[in-house]
Image (tube, rainbow, N blue to C red):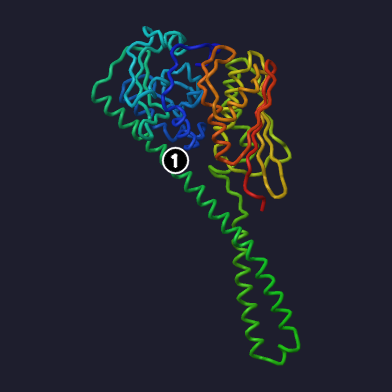
Amino acid sequence: MNSTPFMAYKNEPIPDNEMERLLTLSEFDLDYTDLKESFKDLTYLAAKVAGTEISLINLIDSFTMWSLSSFGVEVEQMPREESVCQHTIMSGKPFEISDLRLDDRFNTNDVVAGPLGLRYYYGIPLEVADGINIGSLCVMDSALKSMTREKVELLEIIAGNVVKRLKSFHKIAQMEAYIKVVEESNKKAAHDIRGPISGIIGLSELMSSSEMIANCEELGEYIGMIQTSSRTLLELADEILSDGTKVRLGDNDFNLGMFRDKLEHLYRSQATYKDVKLTITADPAHMDINFSKDKLMQITGNLISNAIKFTPVRGQINVSLGIEFNDQDKILKIEVSDTGVGISPQEIDNILSGKGVTTSGTSGEKGYGFGLNLVVHLVEMLKGELTINSIPGKGSTFSVLLPQLKVS
């Protein structure tokens, strides 16, 4: 579906609560590549209920429409401005286009004018909170269609189940994160008490070997009890520490190799689509060190999409991923550099203060003005640091430092 160059599309709508909508989507912290099987049954059911060739479950961020699951067509993403679903999220009501070829907003889109030749569209917003639509369930067909009241009701039930599953995944991720914090706390507590207990054992052994204890049988028994109890506590602490050292990679654990591969999979096609060279590297010396995955894809993805938007055709984007150590602190470093149009000092100040505004990209792509604002917010929330260096006309470099859990 991504076979044409980037172009400007007409009448790109932006919800009034766009920043709140994006923040809500970021809180779900979804991995768009891993959910296809989880929603496969619902896209199949939607197509069968509607009697259409195609059905999609889509989420829409600052720059991109991501397809969590699809039936009837293979698609993972497309530019937001090219999607019909960007109109569906504008209200809490379904959005229907009887004939896309007759609608000037869509008749030049590749899915309409290209080989798919789509004509009919029906979309239902995925409302996860009052007025917050993070995406859509849509059905499409190359033939003219119409939805009966019964079909509409069934599609709305399916959309409701999509929302329930998304919320369930979010709750599970929160529980896993909480369990991890508890385990880390237990590990720290065990580490903290191990030292004093070892000292008690050492002192009691020293006392039991003295001549004074040898002449007092009762005192010797008490010291023996202290040694036994202390060794029991020490064994418990060692057991907790041993369990805590087991590596378990879950939704909230990541390493540089996994991070690089995810970014390659998600954003390589966007760069190829615009004929921009994207290079992603990871520090080979620290490839297996684990760190939190929390909000990383939202932060880095927005920076890469923004770089693609402002880099001319045949330009270059370099993404480097690494880990730095400061005393006992572990810091994740993300750097995104481009050979794009650059940013003025005033624009940099506006971005870092959360006042970035909408601008158009080098090939006329619509700018939504919220992607970098979201990055600033998320970096601050994670107690990180964002710096921007740029030379107008030559390119920009965005550097993000995110502190991680202390090295044990």
Three-letter code, disc 1: Phe
As drawn, the residue found furthest toward the bottom would be 215
Q: Position of residue 367 (x, y in %)?
A: 52, 19
Q: Position of residue 142 (x, y in %)?
A: 38, 13
Q: Residue at x 57, y 23 (%)?
A: 305
Q: Position of residue 151 (x, y in %)?
A: 27, 24
Q: Residue at x 76, y 88 (%)?
A: 211
Q: Is residue 343 left or right of residue 130?
A: right
The picture quadrant where one finds residue 285 is top right
Label 1: state its secondary structure: helix
- Tag 1: Cα neighbours inside 10 Å, few (<14), some, or many (≥20)? some
Q: Which residue matches tag 1? A: 169
Q: Residue at x 30, y 15 (%)?
A: 145
The picture quadrant where one finds residue 21 is top left
> Of residues 154 and 6, which is closer to you in this image?
6
> Of residues 147 and 72, which is closer to you in this image?
147
Q: Position of residue 205 (x, y in %)?
A: 71, 79
> In the image, is residue 322 above or below residue 51?
below
> Of residues 301 and 265, which is closer to you in this image?
301
Q: Is residue 254 left or right of residue 56?
A: right
> In the image, is residue 385 above or below residue 187?
above
Q: Is residue 138 left or right of residue 184?
A: left
